[in-house]
């Protein structure tokens, strides 16, 4: 059996508590608070203590899906990403850059938010970029 | 936040408004309790007796949407008593005379009439806040989700400047961020009017810098917000929408309207870890990775850089979201998405973002750094506005009270407000599949005042139908004295009884475009008076 703890940051609210994910044989089995973290100093709330519980929940998406004949069916990454790129470029060509927009995510990392807005601003050419900060 | 979380502990007064801190930010609430143990006065102004309110030295329940009035009222009293910090006003601010004039009419009597806050209590709050050595204001969505959201925030800034309770440790105006990385995603310009680091898309010089960095022409026009994009779909202007890790079908106001827009849009891409209500409407669904399955950085509510680290491989064929976005960028023919890991993405974004410039990926591994951090030798900024405000002098803005957009009437006689529970998170996609959390609460309910419950002939556990001009849901009743008569509260986590079927999407703050989630008019009808 291989056990390790991985220092990371809780994914729930903006407080940013330091957590340790307990990993047993490649599976996350628990969440512990970091004792030396400047924010939470060894404590966590009920959501923090349970932060690993949703990782393996039923309904996690594990394959790309494409709508065919009205139904979402499994597809390869190549097919799904290819379709996204093709349709976005087609709509841009046909209706102009401002016919496209994105909702970025306050749950995703800085790098991911940067990349999505870069796709919409630099590749598509629109500032229709927002996220749920207001919601 | 203008100040950092640990500083709260050394405040002498903490004024909390529109934040259910113990529920939504428990580890910030525990700092506030530490401050209280050290002798700080804790004041809560909130329409509900939340847990933090029950622990406070003073709690008052203001009428929904009356915030500008009580803040102006505090300033009125402070000026009348001469408790303002005149040297701070003279040296650090401008526009004071206009605000002084604007608050003249907000006498304690008038404020009591608008807000329901007794004038003696208002005076007590004014004195404690103004006279304490270090007073900190803590607020959350109860302040911002109003048509007067911007006015409310500016009013709090007026109050802090009037008393010089800003620009020092343990003071400031401190919004608490609800999502782990809402600060970072805003910093990274997931907003329609800025480039990363709050640089204006309309500024030609800035735009040229980004055109050079990204290798192509950029739009000089401000884009659309979330709510405006939904409306643009209905107007036939927006044809394609890419949604990353959001569930607007549950989180956005007026879900019926959002649902129709997501069905009508020509092409919808959803990148998420779950097949959410929103993802079910998509043309393409891309499986992203949870926080345990990828590396990267978050920026906390107090502007602190934090790392997340990969603990396990993504499930099945899912991929880290940064990797998916690079694939999409490349598939669209762009050369700007060739990143081997998040570190190289961070290097690029920090280069273009002056407030992030000094925070390199390795440095934040070892040090606690709050932005702005302009170069490698800059230790960062736990608190802002030490020697001056970003614009030079702090600008006072005179603000007049305006009532909420939708007031109760004969047909819809109650006022509804919404919020979070300690056990759940936003639309519940993560928490409602967590056994420890669903064990606590797994159903929506409505909080009603005992007199209202009696008039409706319902008891706790009974069922009611709650309707607004937008929609209708069925929920159980929880009778509580923690809320004023005529006011009701529903937590918004539960898709099957979504509070946002009721909320008023059409009413937006004119500047921030934030919907007025926190006040709308409803009617309540009994289904079963008692628990079945």
Image (cartoon, rainbow, N blue to C red):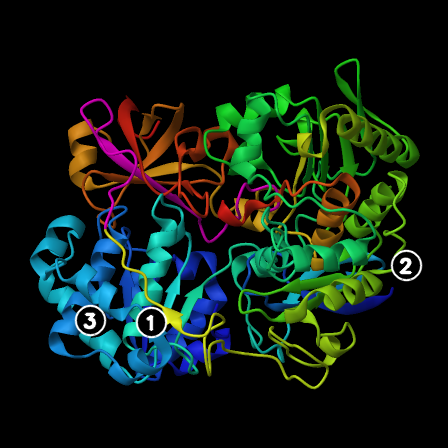
Image-based side of B309 in relation to B405, left or right: right
- Is residue B125 found inside the magenta-colored segment of the image? no
Q: Tag on residue B126?
A: 3
| Marks 2 and 1 share the same chain | yes
Q: Earlier in the sequence, mark 3 or mark 1?
A: 1
Position of B223 relative to B2 (above/below): above
Indicate the quadrant where residue B87 lies. Answer: bottom left
- Is residue B429 found inside the magenta-colored segment of the image? yes
Mark 3 and mark 2 residues within 8 Å of each other at the beta carbon: no
In the displayed image of the protein, which residue is found farthest to the left?
A: B109
Segment colored magenta: B401-430
Q: Position of residue B503 (x, y in %)?
A: 39, 33
Q: Position of residue B127 (x, y in %)?
A: 18, 75
Q: How far apart are labels 3 and 1 at the CA level?
A: 22 Å
Q: Which residue is mark 1?
A: B94
**Chain at tag 2:** B
Image-based side of B522 in relation to B426, left or right: left
Q: Tag on residue B340?
A: 2
* Majority secondary structure of magenta residues: loop
Q: Residue at x 26, y 36 (%)?
A: B415
Pick the residue in front: B222 or B317: B222
Binning the other alpha carbons within 10 Å of mark 1 as few (below 14), some (14 to 19) or many (20 upward) gives: some
Q: Earlier in the sequence, mark 3 or mark 2?
A: 3
**Chain at tag 1:** B
Q: Residue at x 68, y 81 (%)?
A: B367
């Amino acid at each position: 059996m291989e056990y390790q703890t991985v220092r990371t940051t809780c994914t729930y609210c903006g407080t940013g508590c330091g957590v340790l994910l307990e990993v047993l044989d490649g599976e996350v089995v628990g969440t512990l608070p970091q004792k030396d973290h400047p924010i939470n100093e060894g404590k966590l709330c009920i959501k923090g203590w349970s932060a690993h519980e949703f990782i393996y929940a039923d309904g996690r998406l594990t394959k790309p899906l494409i709508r065919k004949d009205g139904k979402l069916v499994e597809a390869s990454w190549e097919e799904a990403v290819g379709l996204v790129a093709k349709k976005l470029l087609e709509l841009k060509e046909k209706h102009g850059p401002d016919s496209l927009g994105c909702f970025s995510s306050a749950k995703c990392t800085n790098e991911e938010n940067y990349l999505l807005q870069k796709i919409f601003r630099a590749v598509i050419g629109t500032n229709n970029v927002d996220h749920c900060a207001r919601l | 936040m203008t100040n950092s979380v640990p500083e709260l502990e050394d405040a002498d007064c903490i004024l909390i408004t529109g934040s259910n801190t113990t529920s939504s930010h428990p580890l910030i609430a525990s700092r506030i309790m530490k401050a209280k143990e050290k002798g700080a006065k804790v004041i809560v102004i909130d329409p509900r007796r939340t847990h933090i309110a029950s622990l406070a030295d003073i709690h008052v329940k203001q009428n929904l949407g009356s915030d500008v009035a009580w803040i102006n009222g505090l300033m009125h009293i402070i000026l009348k008593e001469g408790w303002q910090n005149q040297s701070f006003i003279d040296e650090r601010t401008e526009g004071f005379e206009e605000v002084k004039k604007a608050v003249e009419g907000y006498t304690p009597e008038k404020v009591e009439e608008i807000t329901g806050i007794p004038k003696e209590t208002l005076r007590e709050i004014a004195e404690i806040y103004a006279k304490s050595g270090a007073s900190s204001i803590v607020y959350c969505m109860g302040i911002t989700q109003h048509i007067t959201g911007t006015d409310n925030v500016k009013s709090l800034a007026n109050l802090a400047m009037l008393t010089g309770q800003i620009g020092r440790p343990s003071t400031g105006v401190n919004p608490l961020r609800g999502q782990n990385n809402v600060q970072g995603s805003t910093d990274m310009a997931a907003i329609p009017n800025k480039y990363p680091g709050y640089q204006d898309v309309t500024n030609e010089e800035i735009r040229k810098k980004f055109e050079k960095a990204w290798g192509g022409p950029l739009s000089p026009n401000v884009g659309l917000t979330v709510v405006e994009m939904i409306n643009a779909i209905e107007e036939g202007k927006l044809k394609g929408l890419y949604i990353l890790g959001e569930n607007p079908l549950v989180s956005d106001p007026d879900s019926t309207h959002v649902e129709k827009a997501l069905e009508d849009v020509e092409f919808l891409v959803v990148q998420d870890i779950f097949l959410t209500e929103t993802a079910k409407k998509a043309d393409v669904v891309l499986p992203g990775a949870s926080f345990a399955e990828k590396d990267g950085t978050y920026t906390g509510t107090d502007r602190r850089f934090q790392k997340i680290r990969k603990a396990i491989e993504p499930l099945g064929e899912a991929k880290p979201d940064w990797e998916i976005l690079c694939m999409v960028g490349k598939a669209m023919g762009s050369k700007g998405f060739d990143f081997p890991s998040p570190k190289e993405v961070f290097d690029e974004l920090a280069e273009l973002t002056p407030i992030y410039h000094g925070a390199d990926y390795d440095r934040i591994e070892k040090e606690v750094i709050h932005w702005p951090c302009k170069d490698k030798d800059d230790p960062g900024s736990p608190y802002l506005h030490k020697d001056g405000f970003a614009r030079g002098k702090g600008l006072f803005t005179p603000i007049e009270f305006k009532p909420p957009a939708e007031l109760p009437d004969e047909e819809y006689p109650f006022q509804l407000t919404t919020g979070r529970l300690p056990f759940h998170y936003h639309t519940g996609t993560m928490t409602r599949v967590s056994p420890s959390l669903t064990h606590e609460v797994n159903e929506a309910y409505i909080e009603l005042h005992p007199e209202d419950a009696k008039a409706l002939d319902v008891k706790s556990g009974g069922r009611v139908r709650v309707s607004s001009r937008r929609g209708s849901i069925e929920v159980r009743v929880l009778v509580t004295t923690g809320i004023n008569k005529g006011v009701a509260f529903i937590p918004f986590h539960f898709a099957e009884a979504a509070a946002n079927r009721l909320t008023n999407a059409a009413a937006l703050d004119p500047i921030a475009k934030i919907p007025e989630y926190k006040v709308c008019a409803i009617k309540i009808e009994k289904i079963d008076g008692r628990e079945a």
